[in-house]
Image (tube, rainbow, N blue to C red):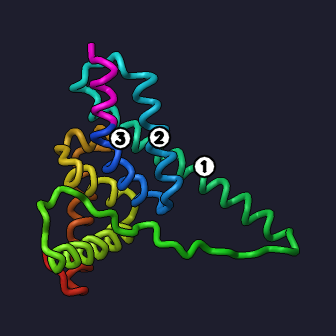
């Protein structure tokens, strides 16, 4: 049985990456934070007694399900808002101008030069912009496979689909992202 400190350490180790995944999916900083907090709370509440080796898969499954639940609720909320706005005489279409995919630097690089840091930041922003354009399932498969470094079977389990679907989503995401980046002069 894992200790409370092990759970706290695990949650601290996945927090930043989970927030980035949620932010890519919902494109809103505050909602992404709420989603990650909900996923962490669900893991701690329902699965703290599980072996620590099972937490990464459980957490990813919980996180992806929490993201999907948010998107479903948001879609329903938008439907009702748009329906009521048709009947309202004071309909205002205000859009959020903030960039939800603003770059958050990682401290994993060992003191890069200022030029390298700027170039890395520009490249990361461009990659994030391309990721945001991918369809949700392709983005989810891509992030789980290549960012979270899950194998095809684990990714399929988290996404609730077949391994073949994961491979298809990843292949399409890679081709689309590579073409998009190539058009902007960045090759990986």
User: Label 3: how many residues lie within 10 Å, few (<14), some (14-19) or many (20+)?
Assistant: some
- Residue drawn at the location 40% of the way across and 29% of the way down: 43
Counting the numbered discs, the total is: 3
Q: Point out residue 11 in the picture as x, y percentages from the top left corner.
A: 33, 35
> Of residues 112 and 55, which is closer to you in this image?
112
User: Counting residues from the N terminus, which is met first, the one under dot 3 or under dot 2?
Assistant: 2
* Prevalent SS, magenta region: helix
The residue identified by callout 1 is 73
Span of residues in magenta: 1-11
Labelled disc at residue 160:
3
The residue identified by callout 2 is 37
- Residue drawn at the location 34% of the way across and 20% of the way down: 4
Q: Which of marks 3 and 2 is in front?
A: 2
Residues tagged 3 and 2 counted as in contact (Cβ below 8 A): no
Q: Which of marks 1 and 2 is in front?
A: 2
Q: Point out residue 165 in the picture as x, y percentages from the top left corner.
A: 27, 51
Residue 137 quadrant = bottom left
Asked whether, in this view, residue 131 is left or right of residue 149, the answer is: right
Q: Point out residue 14 in the picture as x, y percentages from the top left corner.
A: 30, 42
Q: Does the magenta stretch include residue 2?
A: yes
User: Label 1: how many residues lie within 10 Å, few (<14), some (14-19) or many (20+)?
Assistant: few
Q: What element carries label 1?
A: helix
Residue 6 vertical position relative to residue 37 in the rendered view, above or below: above
Cα–Cα gap, marks 3 and 2: 22 Å
- Residue drawn at the location 58% of the way across and 72% of the way down: 96
- Residue drawn at the location 21% of the way across and 66% of the way down: 174
User: Label 2: how many residues lie within 10 Å, few (<14), some (14-19) or many (20+)?
Assistant: some
Q: Point out residue 21 in the picture as x, y percentages from the top left corner.
A: 36, 53
């Amino acid at each position: 049985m894992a200790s409370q400190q092990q759970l706290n350490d695990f949650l601290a180790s996945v927090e930043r990456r989970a927030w980035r995944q949620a932010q890519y999916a919902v494109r809103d900083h505050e909602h992404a934070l709420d989603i990650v907090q909900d996923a962490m709370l669900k893991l701690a509440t329902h699965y703290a007694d599980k072996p620590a080796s099972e937490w990464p898969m459980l957490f990813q499954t919980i996180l992806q399900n929490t993201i999907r639940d948010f998107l479903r609720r948001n879609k329903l909320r938008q439907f009702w808002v748009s329906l009521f706005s048709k009947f309202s005489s004071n309909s205002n279409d205000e859009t959020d101008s903030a960039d939800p995919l603003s770059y958050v630097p990682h401290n994993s690089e060992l003191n890069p030069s200022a030029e390298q840091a700027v170039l890395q930041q520009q490249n990361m922003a461009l990659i994030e912009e391309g990721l945001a354009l991918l369809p949700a399932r392709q983005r989810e498969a891509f992030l789980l496979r290549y960012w979270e470094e899950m194998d095809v079977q684990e990714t399929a389990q988290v996404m609730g689909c077949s391994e073949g679907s994961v491979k298809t989503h990843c292949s399409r995401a890679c081709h689309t992202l590579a073409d998009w980046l190539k058009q902007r002069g960045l090759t990986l």
